[in-house]
């Protein structure tokens, strides 16, 4: 199966959004003001204490909220209907039809979404995994807690995609490994975006 650029990119972002929500479900709710402010600064969120940061995540009108990220997942699933395996699409479509937009409801199904996608065919799973693991790396990088295990996961996926002719991120990846900074991470993101433009 050959993926078009738009499909590969949608799969990648599906992985990122899922990982982003999983992370939010793990850290919410914030209770300590100092911890909340440090977190908000790391992720460039306009919050000044725990309550204001929780509000950003809980308010469906906020771009960074759990509900808004979940809407992106729902949209990506619909865009990928012809790409995902029939049973994968059917299951994802069913469990993401929630009666409300509460973070608790979304958190209750997000893990199952990830489990379902693990059964996808290799090419789809690789792009999903790249998105999922890049989002985790982004989180670790912003919090200055990058682990060797996470860099190894991303390196393995990038190597597998490169071997399949997708394109290399070797130079930007080497730069990131040297300083593990957010700016270096942006370089990898730029290379990934450029590779999607030639993905066929």
Image: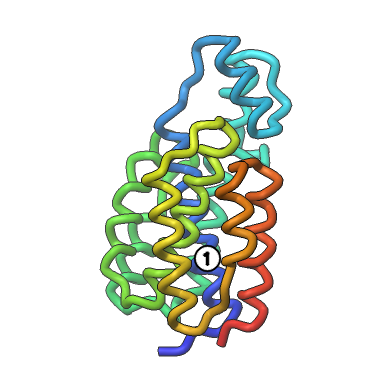
Dot 1: within a 10 Å radius of its alpha carbon, few (fewer than 14), some, or many (20 or more) residues? some
Count of labels in the image: 1
Query: Can you say which quadrant of the picture contains the C terminus?
Result: bottom right
- What sort of colour scheme is used for the picture? rainbow
x, y percent for residue 3: 49, 84
| Residue at 33% in and 40% down | 108
Query: Can you say which quadrant of the picture contains the N terminus?
Result: bottom left
x, y percent for residue 110: 37, 48
Q: Quadrant of residue 93?
A: bottom left
Look at the numbered disc 1 and give the secondary structure of its residue: helix
Identify which residue, 38 or 64, lies in the foreground: 38
x, y percent for residue 24: 48, 35
Q: Is residue 175 left or right of residue 80?
A: right
Identify which residue, 11 or 103, lies in the foreground: 11
x, y percent for residue 17: 51, 52
Identify which residue, 32 or 156, lies in the foreground: 156
| Residue at 59% in and 10% down | 33
| Residue at 45% in and 27% down | 27
Identify which residue, 58 or 165, lies in the foreground: 165
Q: Is residue 48 left or right of residue 87?
A: right
| Residue at 43% in and 64% down | 128
Residue, disc 1: 76
Compared with 54, 79 (above or below) is: below
Compared with 10, 65 (above or below) is: above
């Amino acid at each position: 199966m050959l993926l078009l650029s738009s499909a590969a990119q949608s799969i990648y972002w599906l992985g990122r959004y899922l990982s982003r929500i999983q992370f939010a479900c793990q850290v919410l709710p914030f209770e300590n003001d100092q911890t909340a402010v440090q977190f908000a600064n790391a992720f460039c969120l306009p919050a000044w204490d725990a309550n204001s940061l929780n509000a950003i995540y809980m308010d469906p009108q906020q771009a960074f909220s759990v509900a808004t990220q979940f809407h992106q997942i729902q949209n990506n699933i619909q865009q990928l209907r012809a790409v995902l395996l029939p049973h994968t699409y059917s299951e994802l479509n069913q469990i993401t039809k929630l009666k409300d937009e509460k973070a608790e409801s979304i958190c209750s199904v997000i893990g199952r979404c990830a489990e379902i996608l693990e059964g996808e065919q290799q090419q789809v799973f690789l792009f999903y995994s790249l998105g999922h693991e890049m989002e985790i790396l982004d989180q670790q990088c912003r919090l200055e807690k990058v682990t060797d295990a996470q860099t190894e996961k991303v390196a393995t996926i990038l190597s597998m995609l490169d071997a399949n002719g997708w394109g290399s991120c070797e130079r930007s990846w080497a730069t990131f490994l040297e300083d593990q900074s957010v700016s270096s991470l942006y370089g990898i993101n730029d290379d990934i975006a450029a590779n999607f433009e030639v993905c066929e």
